[in-house]
Image (tube, rainbow, N blue to C red):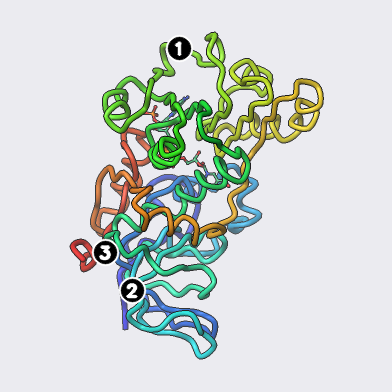
């Protein structure tokens, strides 16, 4: 049996992606095979395309990416199971983040260990479910596990117009938190319509130069030194980065402990633990507390255009790839 998949067999630019016909994978004993219905687009696809920062090649492969099929977020239906699988059976709807190792969700089928997936929220379409695991857990681990966001606090999200920002806003609003979003002017109206109390255009204003201070800052696009960031934190406040310029993130890791001792403010980096907390996230989604914001849905045949849209940074919410059948289910 064969299937369509977006593959990448070397590092480079967008030309490295190819829509290929390859064999449908066969599950190992501990794996399930998923009939993929949708996949979310993430920064991983760009990092994997370029093999940058170079340090990720230690994980992905030195001269070419080891996993030939692209894609880390998946939502679909279990199609067959290995002999040791206990949690899932054919027909189960599942979702998850495959960035811990296997990748491969930009395909009609993918085999994954049963530990890499979770039952899909019952109230979501496949496209919505595929938009949740990666961005949702970056948000939950940053605001909850590290940030300890509490009722009535103030939150600033830098790089607020993307997938993580939309979920962070919903999570914070339910806790009575005042939320400021920083992104480009083009996204301001959309962000206000989602419920941000205030929006800042990063090209016009540097949030670390104003008089405003916040209990918690979540950054998806770190560009500033940890010492500049301190100015925007209230006493005892916490700054958490989930991504951005590599040298800046290294500074945050190197100086974080010293800053905490000297200034009694916290600057931290989140290293995502894929799928850790997915049960909690599923509960929040099923309780109607979180709903992903979808920018556009592309068919698998146009997956490269989907990645290009993500790379252009014009998206408002998540860019999603649909394999077809799942769209209306
Ligand atoms: N920590 C981990 O383990 C881990 C794992 C995976 C991914 N990540 C990271 O997590 C982040 C994912 O966030 P996401 O999915 O929400 O990203 P996203 O969808 O790309 O959104 C980021 C937003 O930031 C805006 N932006 C760009 N430059 C900016 C600047 N200088 N100041 C403020 N905003 C700026 C972008 O729009 P405009 O360009 O139009 O302004 C975009 O709206 C990425 O940085 C990714 O690398 C971290």
Mark 1 and mark 2 lie on one chain; the one further toward the N terminus is 2
Q: Where the N terminus falls, by quadrant?
A: bottom left
Q: Residue at x 47, y 52 (%)?
A: 134
Q: CA distance from mark 3 to mark 2?
A: 12 Å
Q: Where the C terminus falls, by quadrant?
A: bottom left
Task: Answer whether labels 3 and 1 touch (C-beta < 8 Å).
Answer: no
Q: Say left or right for 211 vs 160.
A: right
The residue carrying mark 3 has its beta carbon less than 8 Å from ligand 1: no
The circle on residue 24 is: none
Task: Name the residue tied to disc 3.
Answer: 323
Residue 225 in sight from this viewpoint:
yes
Residue 71 in sight from this viewpoint:
no
Q: Say left or right for 186 vs 182.
A: left
Q: Say left or right for 101 vs 304.
A: right
Secondary structure beneath dot 3 equals loop
Task: Name the residue tied to disc 2.
Answer: 77
């Amino acid at each position: 049996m064969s299937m369509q998949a977006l593959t990448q067999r070397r590092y480079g630019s967008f030309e490295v992606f190819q829509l290929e016909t390859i064999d449908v994978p066969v599950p190992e004993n501990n794996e399930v095979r998923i009939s993929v219905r949708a996949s979310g687009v993430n920064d991983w696809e760009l990092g994997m395309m370029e093999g940058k920062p170079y340090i990720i090649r230690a994980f992905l492969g030195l001269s070419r990416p080891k996993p030939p099929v692209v894609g880390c977020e998946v939502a679909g239906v279990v199609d067959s199971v290995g002999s040791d699988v206990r949690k899932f059976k054919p027909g189960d709807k599942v979702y998850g983040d495959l960035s811990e190792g296997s990748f491969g969700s930009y395909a009609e089928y993918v085999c994954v260990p049963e530990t890499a997936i979770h039952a899909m929220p019952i109230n979501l379409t496949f496209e919505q479910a595929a938009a949740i695991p990666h961005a949702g857990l970056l948000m939950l681990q940053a605001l909850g596990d590290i940030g300890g966001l509490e009722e009535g606090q103030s939150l600033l999200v830098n790089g607020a117009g993307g997938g993580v920002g939309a979920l962070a806003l919903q999570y914070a609003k339910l806790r009575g938190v005042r939320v400021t979003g920083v992104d480009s002017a083009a996204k301001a109206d959309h962000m206000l319509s989602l419920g941000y109390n205030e929006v800042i255009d990063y090209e016009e204003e540097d949030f670390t130069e104003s008089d405003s201070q916040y209990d918690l800052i979540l950054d998806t696009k770190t560009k500033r030194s940890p010492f500049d960031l301190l100015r925007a934190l209230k006493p005892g406040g916490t700054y958490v980065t989930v991504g951005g310029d590599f040298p800046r993130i290294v500074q945050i890791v190197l100086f974080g402990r010293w800053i905490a001792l000297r200034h009694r403010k916290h600057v931290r980096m989140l290293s995502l633990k894929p799928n850790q907390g997915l049960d909690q996230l599923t509960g929040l989604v099923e309780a109607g507390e979180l709903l992903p914001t979808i920018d556009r849905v592309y068919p698998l045949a146009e997956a490269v255009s989907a990645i290009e849209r993500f790379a252009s940074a014009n998206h408002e919410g998540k860019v999603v790839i649909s394999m077809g059948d799942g769209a209306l289910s």
